[in-house]
Image (cartoon, rainbow, N blue to C red):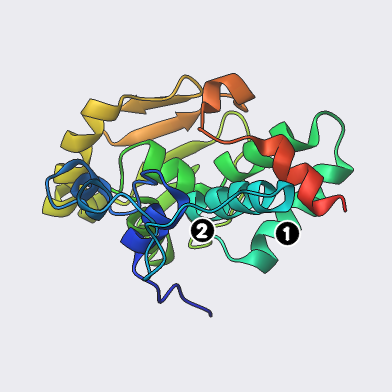
């Protein structure tokens, strides 16, 4: 399986925005984007004139990096979204939000999507009471997501849940903090997802 070898802080700097790839570190004084808010590399400070293709590419890269996907995975989601009824860009974001690792992160079970993905891979997340260790597992409305019993007392998980209270639960999810059980209530709309991205540019890029 391929891995992201580049420093994730450089990814935030390249996209000129915080992608919150390191959880609480991104909100601390150690955040690399706050200290060096320009693109990495010796030419990072120089201004570049953005072309139409450049703007489309940056939006695609931004969404890929937020959800921690590689090109082949991301393009597969786009193909699926383009074949469904509705607005392709909105459908694409909905499919990404329905991933199990993303939902585990949204519920506070991990301080970052990468950390939540590790929990899923290790079999610590249950869907409808059954172990699912596939991060890309697609959730449906009404699905229940919970933490495996013995892991509920984990220090890292407790810290993550505490930090999660500052983010709050999205409207399409429901969390019982006592039992560490969440519910995927419905598929979110584009307005509810509220990511700082222009998904239409991604559609235009792949439609060429």
Q: Does 139 sit above or below residue 121?
A: above
Q: Report crowding for label 1: few under 14, some 14 to 19, many 20 or more residues within 10 A (C-alpha).
A: some
Q: Does 127 sit above or below residue 172?
A: below
Q: Which of the two residues, 120 or 36, is positioned nearer the viewer here? A: 36
Q: Label 2, on which residue? A: 135
Question: Percent x, y for residue 166?
Answer: 22, 27
Determine which of the numbered discs, if any, sits on residue 75 in the image. Answer: 1
Which residue is depicted at the point 19% across and 36% down?
A: 163
Q: Quadrant of residue 18?
A: top left
Question: Percent x, y for residue 118?
Answer: 37, 63
Which residue is depicted at the point 69% across and 67% down?
A: 72
Which residue is depicted at the point 28% across and 50% down?
A: 33
Q: Does 45 sit above or below residue 159?
A: below
User: Callout 2: helix, strand or loop?
Assistant: loop
Of callouts 2 and 1, which one flags the residue occurring earlier in the amino acid sequence? 1
Farthest residue to the bottom: give it. 1
Q: Nearer the viewer, mark 2 or mark 1?
A: 1
Residue 78 seen from this side: yes
- Tell me if 62 is positioned left or right of 147 in this view: right
Q: Which of the two residues, 92 or 35, is positioned nearer the viewer here? A: 35
- Tell me if 107 is positioned left or right of 98 in this view: left
Q: Quadrant of residue 40?
A: bottom left
Residue 129 seen from this side: no
Question: Percent x, y for residue 139?
Answer: 59, 42
- Tell me if 31 is positioned left or right of 50 in this view: left
Q: Report crowding for label 2: few under 14, some 14 to 19, many 20 or more residues within 10 A (C-alpha).
A: many
Gap in Å between the C-alphas at discs 2 and 1? Answer: 17 Å
Q: Does 113 sit above or below residue 69?
A: above
- Tell me if 160 is positioned left or right of 114 in this view: left
Question: Percent x, y for residue 168?
Answer: 31, 24
């Amino acid at each position: 399986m391929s891995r992201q070898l580049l420093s994730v802080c450089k990814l935030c700097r390249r996209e000129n925005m915080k992608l919150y790839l390191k959880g609480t570190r991104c909100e601390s004084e150690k955040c690399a984007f706050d200290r060096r808010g320009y693109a990495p590399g010796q030419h990072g400070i120089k201004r570049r004139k953005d072309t139409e293709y450049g703007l489309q590419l940056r939006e695609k890269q931004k969404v890929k990096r937020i959800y921690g996907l590689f090109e082949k995975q991301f393009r597969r989601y786009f193909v699926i979204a383009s074949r469904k009824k509705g607005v392709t860009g909105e459908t694409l974001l909905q499919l990404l939000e329905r991933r199990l690792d993303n939902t585990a992160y949204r519920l506070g079970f991990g301080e970052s999507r990468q950390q939540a993905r590790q929990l899923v891979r290790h079999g610590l997340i249950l869907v409808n009471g059954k172990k699912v260790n596939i991060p890309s597992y697609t959730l449906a409305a009404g699905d229940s997501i919970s933490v495996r019993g013995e892991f509920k007392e984990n220090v890292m998980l407790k810290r993550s849940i505490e930090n999660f209270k500052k983010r709050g639960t999205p409207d399409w999810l429901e969390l019982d903090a006592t039992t560490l059980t969440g519910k995927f209530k419905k598929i979110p709309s584009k307005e509810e997802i509220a990511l700082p991205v222009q998904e239409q540019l991604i559609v235009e890029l792949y439609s060429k």
